[in-house]
Image (cartoon, rainbow, N blue to C red):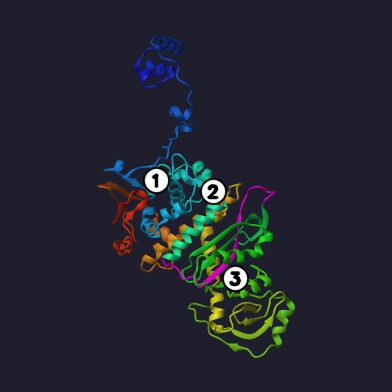
Amino acid sequence: VAWRQRELSAGDIAQLLHQEAVDISVRTIERILAEEGFKKLPRRTQLKIGRTIGGSEVPEVATPVAIERLEGQRFESAGAGVFLFAPFIAQLNLDAVIKEAKLPESKSLSATNYLFSILALKLLGTERHAHVDGHVFDPGPGLFAGLNVLPKCTALSTYSYSLDADHLLRLQDAFIRQVMRLALCSGSIINLDFHTIPHFGDESVLQEHWAGARGKRMKGALTLLAQDADSRLILFSAADIQRSEADDQILAFLSFWRGIKKPMDSTFIFDSKLTTYENLSELNLQKIGFITLRRRGHKLVAETENLKPWRRITIPHDKREYPQPMVHESRIALRGYVGEVRQIIVRGNGREKPAFLITNDFEMPAELLVGNYARRWRVENGIAEAVKFFHLNALSSPILIKVHFDVIMTMIADTLYCRLARQLRGFEDCDAAKIFRNFVKGGGTVEVRDGNITVKFSKRAHNPVLRSVAWSTLPKQMPWLNGANLSFQFS
């Protein structure tokens, strides 16, 4: 009777009696329990009983936690480095951004819980949602998201499916407005480029695009990324672009950017395949500066042999292998473009064929114009970093809208890494992978006392750099955790 009151089954009771050298059949035990007034237990799954294949441990169900209930607790966390981003999240007021986007919630978890859980995985370099199993027993990232532990991969994936295009556009818009409000970037020069995210969803919906990371054409989701040239922050993304829509994406970005940047004095830089000459004419009519390449053919290249005069310029950028190319300037007309554009032919830049730059800016010095276009590789480096560290090419979801959600979360994580890097003396220009390896990766101890969260990091070679950061000038409270104060200790 005492064992049944602990909700043990007749089979469990038979085993316990056997250990005490009392052998009674399961049927006899069931009859005795029935005579005592106990009904049969309802059928339970192996998971509810606590048995799993191979005896593996079952993680807790993710539930919101209150700091008051954690009073006095102290635990080790392999993902304690994620707390280094908390001051910058508070600075960006990210929890208010999530509320402004009006994202959906479930009965048990809020939108902030879900997004901070996925953000924690991004910041910790977790490759796929399926790999969240490596963190579901770690209370550190869970506390960062306002939970006891992170939700399992099914919960995270299901939530991403519930977000439609309007949710994602509102989230992106609210986040970029906050970035511009804090003056984290100027937005004066914007680099734009396409990237194909390999995808394995519905074959009837997906189209083939060139995937530079894979070096071939393949089924995938074509994505446009816009990056601030100076700060290298990603400012816009649009995913699941059809081939017929690709040429007009620059106008879609212009519409978005007009609502963000005031006054509108930006210059767009992109390659020759991003849009058409007709759309270049539209940019010019709306008084938007652009720098791009002219599509060159064999005849156009051959004609450069007879052009004169050529002059040598010096590009004002450090570490250039060919800092003094030869240029030839002229005004030309393009089919579909109303008016003339300025053309600068560049040779002696390390390429076999000359480059044909075209722009509607007739006043900028050629040295600066060529130099600004030469920096366009930064957006390609940003994409390469997102592919390598934030794992954009590791998606396997059959629902395309999830791609855009993953890209937006990558954009937010990339911004946080840039903010952290700016505080680290000597590491200001390092990529996310190096910042993670030297500062974020590694365990620590988390302690909650008097409503304060203290994170003590294990001894590491780069701790003196973290110790020298002016943490006192950054926000100390975590608004999404009832305003709990956060402090760091570095061994």
The answer to whether residue 390 is visible is no
- Of mark 2 and mark 3, the one earlier in the sequence is 2
Q: CA distance from mark 1 to mark 3?
A: 41 Å
* Residue nearest the observer in this picture, 444 or 170: 170
Residues at badges 2 and 3 in contact (C-beta under 8 Å)? Answer: no
* Residue nearest the observer in this picture, 233 or 122: 233
Instruction: Name which quarter of the figure residue 424 lies in.
Output: bottom left
Measured from the top left, where is residue 97 in percent x and y?
A: 44, 55
The residue range painted magenta reads 182-205
Is 201 in the magenta? Answer: yes
Pointer 1: what residue? Answer: 142
Residue at screen point 42% across, 58% down: 436
Pointer 2: what residue? Answer: 163
The answer to whether residue 101 is visible is yes
- Name the amino acid type tagged 3: Phe
Q: CA distance from mark 2 to mark 3?
A: 30 Å
Circle 2 packing at 10 Å, graded few (<14), some (14-19), many (20+), is some
Is 419 in the magenta? Answer: no
Q: Is residue 170 above or below residue 329?
A: above
Q: Is residue 420 above or below residue 95?
A: below
Measured from the top left, where is residue 223 in percent x and y?
A: 59, 59
Circle 1 packing at 10 Å, graded few (<14), some (14-19), many (20+), is many
In front: label 2 or label 3 = 2
Q: State the mark number for residue 394.
A: none
- Of mark 1 and mark 2, the one earlier in the sequence is 1
Circle 3 packing at 10 Å, graded few (<14), some (14-19), many (20+), is many
Residues at badges 1 and 3 in contact (C-beta under 8 Å)? Answer: no
- Name the amino acid type tagged 2: Leu
